[in-house]
Amino acid sequence: MNTDALVELIAKRVMEQLLALQGTTEARKAHQSVLVVGDCDNRQQLELALGNEYALSFTADRQNDERPRPAKYDHIILASLSNSLLSALAIGLERGSEGCVIVESLLLGKTVHILEEGIAYRRFRDTANPAFYQVFQDKEATLCSFGMAVVTLDSLSDALSGADTPEKQEIASVNEVVYEVSAPKERAYVEPKLADKGVFNLEQRVIGEKDLRTCYEQGYRKIRLQERALITPLAKDFLRMKEGFELV
């Protein structure tokens, strides 16, 4: 065999191995299975966002009563979160078939990604009573503390691959969640003004647990609120737990 023929044969074998390796990699990517729970109004956008790297299964397409088993899937996506399902999941209730799938996923230690576009209560941010809207924000924060994560369609692919993990907001506990009306982001804390005889005057319209905790850690035990101020349930729990800490 001459040198040219030998080189050609070696090059052919190398190309065959490279193609085989590429095919194995693509097959491995395709094995990433995703279970999409609930009605998905933007299914086409979801499929485009994930591309061919994931095999999607939709609970809405199931014709029988058999409930899908989350253990069989690599990723769980909650496409729509109604107000009733949000309230049920926040206290660990299995509401309907969708709730059963989500609860089982969390018990298995899986991260359930909630599509931000499918969260029902957020559509009423501009019209809802501020205190009432915060009730639903509290429930959403509770779900995140359980191991769920809110993502947009644009960031979903990175979330499933783990590319956005360092940028995720760390939630240490439900008690550390800060409440606001405009968006579920931490609002700027207003430094309370010192009144006569060491009594703090909190001027916020809505008093959260973090507001009271800050005053308590600074050594103050008496807090004065403005008239008709609203106190969140977590703030009330904090008052009950701290002996000698009171409102005047």
Image (cartoon, rainbow, N blue to C red):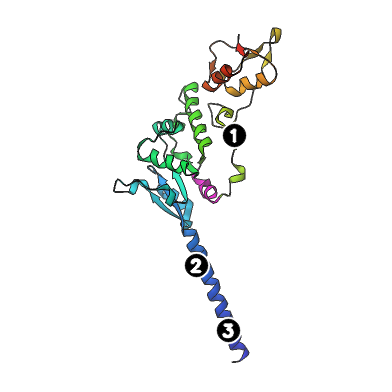
Q: Residue 69: x percent and y percent? A: 39, 48
Q: Amino acid at mark 1?
A: Ala
Few, some or many residues within 10 Å of mark 2 (<14, 14–19, 20+): few
Which residue is nearer to you in this view: 17 or 108? 108
* Foreground disc of the pair 3, 1: 1
Q: Amino acid at mark 3?
A: Glu
From the image, give the main secondary structure of the stretch colored magenta.
Answer: helix
Contact flag, marks 3 and 1 (Cβ < 8 Å): no
Give the spatial CA distance, label 2 vs label 1.
42 Å
Q: Amino acid at mark 2?
A: Gly
Q: Secondary structure at mark 3?
A: helix
Q: Secondary structure at mark 2?
A: helix
Q: Secondary structure at mark 1?
A: loop
Contact flag, marks 2 and 1 (Cβ < 8 Å): no
Q: Residue 28: x percent and y percent? A: 49, 61
Q: Residue 102: x percent and y percent? A: 43, 41
Q: Residue furthest left?
A: 64
Residue at image position (53%, 28%) is 182
Q: Determine if residue 214 is in view.
A: yes
On the image, numbered disc 1 is attached to which residue? 172
Which range of residues does the magenta coloring cover? 152-161
Q: Determine if residue 205 is in view.
A: no
192 vs 33: above or below: above
Q: Residue 119: x percent and y percent? A: 45, 36
Give the spatial CA distance, label 3 vs label 1.
61 Å
On the image, numbered disc 2 is attached to which residue? 23
Kindly identify which numbered label has been placed on residue 70. Answer: none
First in residue order: circle 2 vs circle 1 = 2
Give the spatial CA distance, label 3 vs label 2.
23 Å
On the image, numbered disc 3 is attached to which residue? 8
Quadrant of the image containing the C terminus: top right
First in residue order: circle 3 vs circle 2 = 3
